[in-house]
Image (cartoon, rainbow, N blue to C red):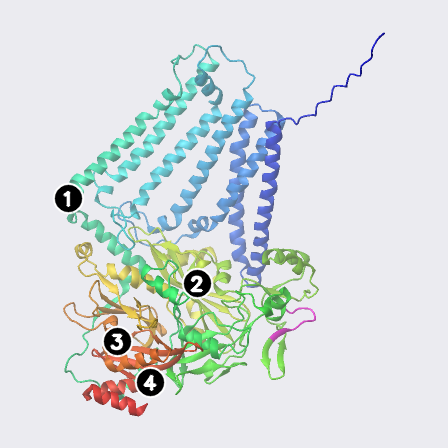
């Protein structure tokens, strides 16, 4: 009997995934890279379109096309060069058609990236086309300085691009040579490394290797020009030294010759490697024609590099030894000629060689004081800077001594801002308005120059608020601010409030010079987002009225903004502004609707002329027809031979968060920019004839208007760039006023910026903190103690100095800003052996005055915060006065009031409710003792 058993069927094994082939993987990588690159280039192209529409709307279409042609040429050059370098070996080395196409694909991606990087540098490639000579040559190579500013940078960048192309071509050649010779039959028993070299050592590989070496050697050879701007002290700090020194250029064993040796070594290495590879190729393809050692391997191949490397290191060692043995023991005498070059070049490059120096000997001791009427009639006293047109903040890199103070202030980075605070309290008026900053301007009132603090009432969009949360609200309804608010710098009401020159909503002006026909502010420092005007069926909010609010439509006959008159503009504007679907589908946008983009004055200018740098503190002025923003622009370079390198920009200015600091060693106050606060129209005026701005003017005909074309009502408001003066008088002049090389080397006459006590007095002890005295604006009388000027009354920008360690006054630096005297730089110097109280000592005298200390102490005990104002150094009737306002602020209602003014005259502080009263005490009360002063002040209170 047979027994049947059920045998289970063998289970079928699951089909395991196969490891993808390299070809499959590379195809996917190329697809992903291509898609990513296409999206990136599409993003860049949309920005390019928006830039064209903007420049076309402003009348600068030619600027766009000049840029576009150069950008296109650079992109195409990079793309074609990379394709030729990388794809050519795929055909030369016999790769299959599919691999050739992939190589071409890869080359196109690499070429697009290289072209894009080159395209970003297009401004540097425009420079040599119309470069204007400086008319000065460097003392080492004899080249005009324009060569270093305009010609050398694009040459170096082009060579770097060639180097990248050559390296990419070399690697492509090696890969394709290996892939193309994979199945070839090679002689047996040959050294594996020699066989590998022979396979990759094709003629194309050798050509790319030679090109790589030649380009690298050329770049090294160009480094000799870097000697002209290199730091020349081991302990070099900003403002200490730059340029070639003795060991760099004198003698055979010099740094310059070391660069030549390095370049020759690179060439020799390249030739040696190429010959070795060619021998390996010949040994592989023609067995027996060349005998190579059987032990020839990577180590032996590397030994080819040894002679060149050894020679280079040996030469540099001798140069370093010579510096230590023969140069340093003979300093400073051996370095004085080169140090003198550095001093002269730095002063020339930063314009400090134009400073007029004059000796100031203030009256002291028992010398009779000028009469009180002479002080009170002075335009300086009539415009005393009590209401400061500035906001002081800590640097973002906070010094350790200020950390505790910031913690006491609950993280507030503001040091001093009473003017801004009282404007926010009294002139905001509506919840959607705000003030971004305060400035100082002058206007003619009743035939006299009158200084004022000013601020623009904007509609800030940097912080989301309930009325601008929705896109429709902030884009169509709340589109613009209203009015320029001004206050007289030296006046106060009986309660300590400012006296306004223009104020209110709608804004009204007390003086004709401040009246404007259209106070709308579409473009301002707080206008972060795009705004639409002339919407379909919707009017913009204008100003509040007793009945509610008034509405306005942007005038159709006023040229402003970009018309959104086709679907492509909707697409691009929606994408670039970050509101794609709203812009694309909104029925509020019609063919007559206009969009206002890049509404902050500085970023608007950057869209037109990013090759110039700007002072980050634009200011607004009234011009009759409307409000105009003024932006100070400078031309610059970092390639001026022998000049010191420094930063341009204010590290304490919040706007520098989106604008990086520029490194430069040449700067010129060359361009004034006017931006219409309503229309956004931008006008650039060329103020000086210097080579950099002349070059840009030649590249972009019509971009700059001549200085004489500036309307008089705008010309009257031109101011000197604060950040330029900060460089000149904070970083350059304190060192480089020592024009003699030996004096400079020894630092015998170093000066330092004066210090002042400023800001709230915090804590029970009433502690205040000392800061470096900033720049201050004032109205000066030219002539007499000051330098002469065509205009006897000058709107001035100044800064005080003390010696390096002592605190006595050493100098007062000033720049005039009025009329044809604009830009006149001067320094009033006190004799070295004369003591005169400095600003910090004046603050100490205030602290030590028992009458003033009692009053400040009383306010502190009453829970009122006392704010020490900016200490201004003023020259009146030959006398040096220190003027400091005292503000008080309730902790419950933080609105500052100007309660006292302190004048320090000949070392004695005097306090009054107004500057006139303080001066009266100083002149007439000088004969009163302290007890009588206290009784008098108590009775008058």
Sequence-wise, which precedes: disc 4 or disc 3?
Answer: 3
Sequence-wise first label, 1 or 2: 1
Place of residue 3 in the rendered image (x, y in percent of width and height, measured from the top left): 83, 11
Q: State the quadrant of the N terminus.
A: top right
Mark in the foreground, 2 or 3: 3
**Principal SS element in the magenta part?**
loop
The span from disc 4 to disc 3 (Cα, nearest Å) is 19 Å
Question: Which residue is rendered at x = 40% and y = 75% of the image?
Answer: 418
| Lower position in the chain sequence, tag 1 or tag 4 | 1
Q: Can you see residue 791?
A: no
User: Which residue sits at x=38%, y=46%?
Assistant: 152
Direction top: furthest residue? 1
Q: Residues within 10 Å of mark 2 (few under 14, many from 20)?
A: some
Q: Is residue 247 magenta?
A: no
Q: Which mark is residue 654?
A: 2
Which of pointers 2 and 4 lies earlier in the amino acid sequence?
2
Q: Can you tell which of label 1 and label 4 is closer to the viewer? A: 4
Mark 1 or 3, closer to the camera: 3
Front: mark 4 or 3: 3
Which residue in the protein does label 1 denote?
Answer: 329
Judging by the rendered image, the residue that carries numbered circle 3 is 847
Task: Name which quarter of the figure residue 810 lies in.
Answer: bottom left
Identify whether 78 is placed above or below 190: below
- Could you tell me which secondary element the residue under label 3 belongs to? helix
Few, some or many residues within 10 Å of mark 4 (<14, 14–19, 20+): many
Q: Which mark is in front, 1 or 2?
A: 2
Asked if the residues shown at circle 1 and circle 3 are in contact, with their CB atoms under 8 angstroms apart, the answer is: no
- Give the residue at mark 4: 914
Q: Residues within 10 Å of mark 3 (few under 14, many from 20)?
A: some
Q: Nearer the viewer, residue 908 or 117?
A: 908
Between the residue at mark 2 and the residue at mark 4, the CA separation in whole angstroms equals 33 Å
């Amino acid at each position: 009997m047979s027994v049947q058993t059920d045998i289970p069927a063998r289970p079928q094994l699951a089909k395991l995934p196969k490891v993808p082939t390299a070809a499959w993987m590379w195809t996917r990588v190329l697809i992903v890279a291509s898609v990513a690159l296409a999206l990136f280039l599409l993003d860049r192209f949309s920005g390019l379109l928006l830039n064209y529409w903007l420049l076309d709307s402003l009348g600068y279409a030619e600027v766009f096309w000049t840029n576009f042609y150069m950008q296109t040429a650079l992109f195409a050059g990079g793309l074609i060069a990379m394709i030729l370098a990388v794809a050519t070996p795929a055909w030369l080395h016999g790769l299959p058609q599919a691999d050739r196409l992939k190589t071409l694909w890869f080359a196109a991606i690499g070429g697009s990236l290289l072209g894009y990087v080159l395209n970003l540098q297009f401004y540097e490639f425009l420079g040599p086309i119309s470069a204007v000579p400086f008319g000065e040559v460097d003392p080492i190579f004899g080249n005009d300085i324009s060569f270093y500013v305009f010609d050398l940078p694009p040459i170096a960048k082009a060579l770097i691009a060639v180097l990248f192309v050559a390296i990419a071509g070399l690697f492509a050649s090696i890969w394709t040579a290996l892939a193309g010779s994979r199945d070839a039959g090679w002689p047996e028993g040959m050294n594996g490394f020699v066989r590998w070299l022979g396979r990759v050592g094709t003629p194309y590989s050798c050509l790319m290797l030679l090109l790589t070496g030649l380009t690298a050697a050329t770049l090294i050879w160009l480094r000799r020009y870097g000697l002209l701007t290199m730091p020349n002290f081991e302990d070099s700090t900003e403002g200490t030294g730059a340029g070639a020194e003795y060991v760099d250029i004198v003698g055979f064993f010099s740094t310059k010759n070391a660069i030549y040796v390095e370049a020759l070594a690179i060439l020799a290495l390249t030739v040696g490697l190429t010959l070795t590879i060619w021998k390996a190729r010949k040994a592989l393809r023609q067995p027996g024609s060349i005998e190579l050692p059987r032990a020839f391997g990577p180590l032996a191949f590397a030994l080819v590099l040894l002679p060149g490397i050894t020679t280079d290191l040996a030469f540099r060692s001798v140069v370093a030894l010579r510096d230590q043995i023969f140069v340093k023991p003979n300093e400073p005498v051996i370095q004085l000629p080169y140090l003198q070059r550095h001093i002269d070049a730095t002063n020339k490059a930063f314009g400090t060689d134009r400073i007029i120096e004059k000796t100031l000997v203030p009256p002291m001791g028992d010398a009779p004081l000028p009469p009180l009427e002479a002080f009170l009639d002075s335009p300086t006293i009539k415009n005393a800077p009590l209401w400061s047109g500035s906001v002081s903040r800590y640097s973002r890199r906070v010094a350790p001594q200020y950390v505790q103070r910031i913690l006491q202030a609950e993280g507030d980075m503001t040091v001093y801002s009473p003017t801004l605070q009282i404007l926010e309290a009294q002139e905001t008026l509506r919840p959607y308005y705000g003030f971004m900053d305060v400035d100082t301007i002058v206007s003619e009132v009743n035939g006299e120059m009158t200084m004022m603090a000013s601020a623009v009432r904007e509609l800030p969009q940097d912080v989301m608020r309930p009325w601008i949360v929705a896109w429709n609200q902030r884009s169509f309804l709340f589109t613009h601010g209203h009015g320029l608010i001004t206050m007289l710098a030296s006046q106060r009401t009986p309660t300590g409030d400012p006296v306004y020159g223009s104020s209110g909503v709608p804004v009204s002006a007390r003086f004709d010079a401040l009246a404007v026909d259209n106070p709308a502010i579409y473009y301002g420092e707080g206008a972060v987002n795009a705004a639409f005007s002339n919407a379909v069926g919707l009017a913009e909010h204008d100003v509040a009225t007793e009945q509610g609010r008034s509405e306005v439509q942007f005038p159709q006959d006023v040229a402003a903004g970009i018309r959104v008159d086709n679907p492509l503009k909707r697409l691009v504007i929606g994408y670039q502004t970050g509101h794609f679907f709203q812009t694309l589908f909104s029925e509020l946008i019609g063919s007559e609707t206009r969009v206002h983009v890049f509404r902050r004055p500085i970023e608007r200018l950057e869209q037109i002329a990013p090759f110039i740098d700007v002072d980050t503190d634009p200011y607004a002025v009234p011009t009759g027809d409307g409000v105009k923003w003024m932006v100070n622009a400078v031309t610059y370079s970092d390639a001026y031979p022998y000049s010191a390198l420094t930063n341009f920009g204010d590290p304490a200015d919040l706007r520098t968060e989106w604008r990086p600091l520029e490194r430069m060693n040449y700067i010129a106050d060359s361009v004034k920019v006017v931006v219409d606060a309503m229309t956004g129209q931008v006008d650039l005026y060329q103020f000086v004839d210097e080579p950099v701005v002349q070059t840009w003017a030649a590249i972009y005909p019509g971009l700059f208007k001549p200085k004489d074309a500036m309307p008089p009502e705008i010309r009257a408001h031109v101011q000197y760039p604060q950040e330029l003066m900060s460089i000149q008088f904070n970083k350059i002049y304190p060192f480089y006023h020592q024009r003699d090389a030996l004096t400079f080397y020894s630092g015998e006459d170093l000066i330092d910026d004066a210090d002042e006590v400023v800001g709230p007095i915090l804590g029970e002890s009433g502690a205040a903190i000392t800061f470096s005295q900033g720049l201050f604006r004032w109205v000066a009388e030219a002539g007499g103690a000051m330098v002469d000027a065509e205009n006897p009354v000058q709107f001035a920008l100044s800064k005080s100095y003390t010696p390096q360690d002592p605190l006595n006054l050493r100098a007062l630096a000033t720049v005039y800003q009025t009329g044809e005297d604009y830009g006149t730089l001067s320094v009033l110097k006190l004799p070295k052996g004369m003591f005169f109280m400095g600003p910090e000592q004046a603050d100490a005298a205030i602290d030590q005055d028992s009458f003033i200390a009692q009053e400040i102490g009383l306010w502190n005990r009453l829970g009122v915060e006392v704010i020490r104002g900016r200490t201004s150094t003023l020259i009146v009737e030959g006398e040096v006065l220190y003027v400091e306002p005292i503000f008080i602020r309730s902790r419950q209602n933080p609105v500052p009031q100007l309660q006292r003014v302190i004048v320090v005259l000949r070392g004695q502080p005097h306090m009054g409710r107004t500057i006139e009263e303080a001066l009266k005490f100083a002149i007439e009360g000088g004969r009163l003792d302290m007890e009588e002063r206290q009784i008098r002040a108590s009775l008058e209170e």
